Amino acid sequence: MEINRFQGRSLAVIGDFSLEERLYLFKKTTELKKILSKKKGEESEAFRINNGDFGVYEVFLESSTRTKESFKNAAEFHRVKISSLDAGASSINKKESYADTFNTLTGYDNSVFIVRSKLEGVCRWLEINGKMYARRNGLNVSPSFINAGDGKHEHPTQELLDEFTFLERLGNNRDSIHIALIGDLFHGRTVHSKVQGLQIFNKVQVDLIAPTPLSLPDYYIREMEQLGYKVRIFESIEAYLNQNTIADIWYFTRPQLERMGDDILKSADFLRDKITFKREYIEKLPQETTFYHPLPRHKEHPTIPSFLDTTDLNGWEEQSANGKLIRIILLGLVAGKLGSDFKPPSKPPEEITKSFIEDIPIDENRPVKRYTEGINPVSNGIVIDHICRGDNRRDIRDHTARIINVMKLFGKGGEWITASREDEKMMKGIIFRPEREELSPSEINKLSAIAPGATLNIIKKSRVVKKLRLHMPPKVYNLDSISCSNPDCISHPSHCENVPPEFINTAGNTLRCAYCEKEHTFKEIWK
């Protein structure tokens, strides 16, 4: 039997499902919702996995009620084997690795794992490890890992139900959305998933409403702008309502001030006041405005006060109910019960990746450029030029030392900081290594990751016989000297999970951790 496109898939971040795949999921959710509303039980059978041996395992290492119970009820709809790992008694809390725990549970005929953890990027690592386990043990389908919230990173299933709810609210019109995101945008993982998730709409305007300590991290704002979203920033609801262009979809999040230290807690009342809706604001809202919230609301300090429950602003109850339906369809997809009729778009043309090692032709007609270490010419060896060009002297000096240490360029030679010949105001670093043998291809690749923008000159008989301009590689991985700087990332060395660090070169020429997606400059990933 042919495995369909969805079977065995994981959902670590919302971008793991393409736009077309999400629209298909929403189409199936709409079908099921209509069937269940008409109480046509026989028609719902086509959506059920109906296999008592199919294992769905809930692993919630952080407290949850709504997400956990939503998935539990979704699994019960499918009539499958449902198990749950008690976080308090979990072997993970007894220093067993995530890989060992989930490999063991996979061996007990469990196919889908729903995971919530304080560590970020957990499901991405488990997906990679699960595929390796499946290959070693002859499994036809790898286990699926569904992210039910990882630290302050993402909550993709919440994003699915939010997108579905917004589409219902807009009559399935995907032309545009104008949404206000309000509350703790710093820790709000449901908001972070919206950076990619809102691409389902052709035109997106996002208004960010949060005081500075709770504001959305800059790299998420940059990504929104790179995606073509119109982004505006406001310090409070009051300031937002004192201007003329107000969204008709409001999305609130609970402030998680307990995560931000004593200084923030001292100003808790002030911060909450900025993001709490008040009765006198109602008259300033556009007609047909709808409020949403991933829930739960704080019972003492709700950003959406309970007096709004009986008003037409209440969209959060329908939103919450949609959660079970979305998760029913998601489980059906990754189990392979649904999705066989999905028609993917035609395969896009393959991207041609430009080499990040650029071979610069040596022009024999130009005057010979000779490198000298002091007054002595370098007759044979290597010279790494243009290191950190344009940075200040201290940063150049520090990173030059880092290059020498990582590349093990010890021994004879020297290092200089000097002005660029092209622009005397621009400083650069140079490493001279006389008599050093030519670097191997793997060493050159490594050098390109730690010194992008530099040039590597191979010198023989006092002439530059080969010149390579180094650019940032598309990926940086398989190197002992790199590490994600996010202490909450599953790959951070402090967690002893032995997760191999990996970074993706973004369009903005920063490096994004493959697990937690924290962005780094090329200097920041080196231990």
Image (cartoon, grey):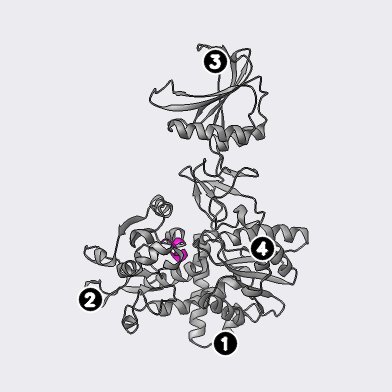
Of badges 2 and 1, nearer the viewer stands 2
- Note whether 33 is above or below 398 in the view shown: below
Query: First in sequence: mark 3 or mark 1?
Result: 1
Residue beneath label 1, please? 41
- Which mark is first along the chain, 2 or 4? 4
Label total for image: 4
Location of residue 15 in the rendering, given as x and y in whole percent from the top left corner: 52, 59
Query: Which mark, by number, is residue 372?
Result: 3
In the rendered view of the protein, which quadrant contains the N terminus? bottom right
Per the image, the residue denoted by label 2 is 280
N-term mark: 4 or 3: 4
Task: Please give the name of the residue rendered at 70% of the width and 80% of the height, measured from the top-left corner.
Answer: 52
State yes or no: discs 2 and 1 in contact (Cβ < 8 Å). Answer: no
Contact, CB < 8 Å: mark 3 with mark 2? no
Q: Which mark is residue 98?
A: 4
Mark earlier in primary sequence (3, 2): 2
Residue 167 picture quarter: bottom left
The answer to whether residue 37 shows anywhere in this view is: yes
Which region is colored magenta? 186-192
For marks 2 and 1, the one nearer the N-term is: 1
Helix, strand or loop at mark 3: strand
